[in-house]
Amino acid sequence: MGTRKDQLHLGAFIYYSGHHHYGWRHPESGADKIFNYKFYRELAKTAERGKFDMMFLADLLYVMGADQAASGMLDPLTLLSALSTETEKLGLTATVSTTYNEPYNVARKFASLDHISEGRAGWNIVTSQLDVEAYNYGKPEHPEHGLRYKMAREFVEVATLLWDSWEDDSLIVNREEGQFADAKKIKEVEYKGEWYSTKGTLNVPRSPQGYPVLIQAGSSGPGQDFAASFGEVIFTAQQSLEAAKAFYESVNSKLADYGRERGSLKIMPGLSPIIGATEEEAQSKYKELQELIPPAAVVGMLSGMLRFDLSEYPVDGQLPEIPDPVEASNGMKSRVQLIMDMARKDKLSILELGRRLLGARGHMQFVGTYEQLADLMQLWFEEYGCDGFNIMPPVLPGNLDEFVDHVVPILQARGLFRTEYTGSTLREHLGLERPDIR
């Protein structure tokens, strides 16, 4: 293994009652509590007990298949604002779409969360995926993949200009002289782009971190370019160390094009652990979860993602030849490519492929002991396949507790992970600089 002087980073990625698509059916899942604030409060406290850098909330702007799968989500910014009062150090990251929001609203909400949490806000920037989301917002269809990223660049540019509209020391609050703020240090933003425009000043002063930590969750070509220009953390799906190292180098090689240094962006693949004290225990848990996935769900999911009807093909057979599935996709192109590569490389049947995907939604699923998981994480980190991981517990809340109780101590004992927080803000946890006023 290589040697690194830094330590790895951990995010606790919270998604319904777990990342296994049918884990909600497990008797120990919190599926009946996903609209209950106390459920998330306990998860946040567990993540902070484990010294995680951040808690990472997903957001989907639609409801689909609610008769058979966990559906619907509390608004992440509202939820994290409440959780900020229950935690002291844990970073609080919300997923918010650029496609179905306005820059001023988003800039205001994240500046507010950063103030409320005293510098622990992060924004997972997504462009959304499906036409059904467009319908909810009165749009006839979801914008094309490349266009969404062009729009997102402009969106984030406007948001950062708004965050910079107040200088750090603009507030004076001089009661005797009647001066609340220094007008010379507050500027009006005037921006008119192709998709967004604004004229005015953000009504929230510059927040403790300057900007929330900017996180990007795409691995396609446009996604990598977007991350290299704006991103400070990139959340990616990688299935092998070889692919992870190639992705790590690809993204880092693009930073210089945007005047950035290596290390200014942290790469954190998703990792969904099914773990136990023994291999037999872990395999038993894995088998129990996989058997919760009905074959019909597999066919429906893959048909939708690949935009190809698989209902006439045997589930125990391999994928048929599908013309240009990546080009046909208008959603997660990198995820579709991963699906095709996985199916061909491992010669998976339709059922095997679908169950593997539904087990961790295309992210790496690990089955093994606590020590074996720590070994894998150390290898990926020291071989520069990543800077850390977004941990995706298959069933919540129990699997997060299990990781904190059994894997975190191993990582700490090896010197790979902090034993105490040394900073107070999410930027400090991640080793990221506070942005200057432009």
Image (tube, rainbow, N blue to C red):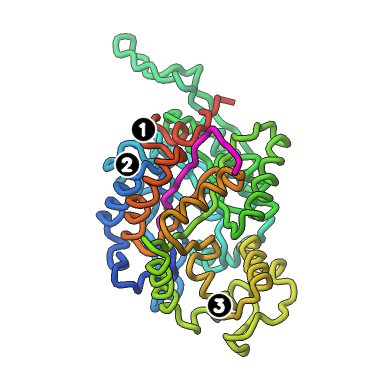
> Which comes sooner in the sequence, label 3 or label 2?
2
**Classed neighbour count for the residue bearing mark 2: other residues with Cα under 10 Å, few (<14), some (14–19), many (≥20):** many
> Which comes sooner in the sequence, label 3 or label 1?
1
Q: Decide if residue 108 is on the left or right side of residue 384.
A: left
Residue at (37, 37) in percent of width and height: 419
Badge 3 vs badge 1, beta-carbon distance below 8 Å = no
> Which comes sooner in the sequence, label 2 or label 1?
2
Which of the numbered marks, if any, corresponds to residue 298?
none
Q: Which residue is mark 3?
A: 352
Residue 407 image position (x, y, % from top left)? 39, 51
Spatial CA distance of label 3 from label 1 is: 46 Å
Depth-wise, is mark 3 or mark 2 nearer the camera?
Answer: 3
Q: Decide if residue 174 is on the left or right side of residue 210.
A: left
- Which is more toward the observer, 142 or 80? 80
Quadrant location of the C terminus in the rendered image? top right
The answer to which quarter of the image holds residue 313 is: bottom right
The answer to which quarter of the image holds residue 294 is: bottom left
Q: Which residue is mark 2?
A: 84
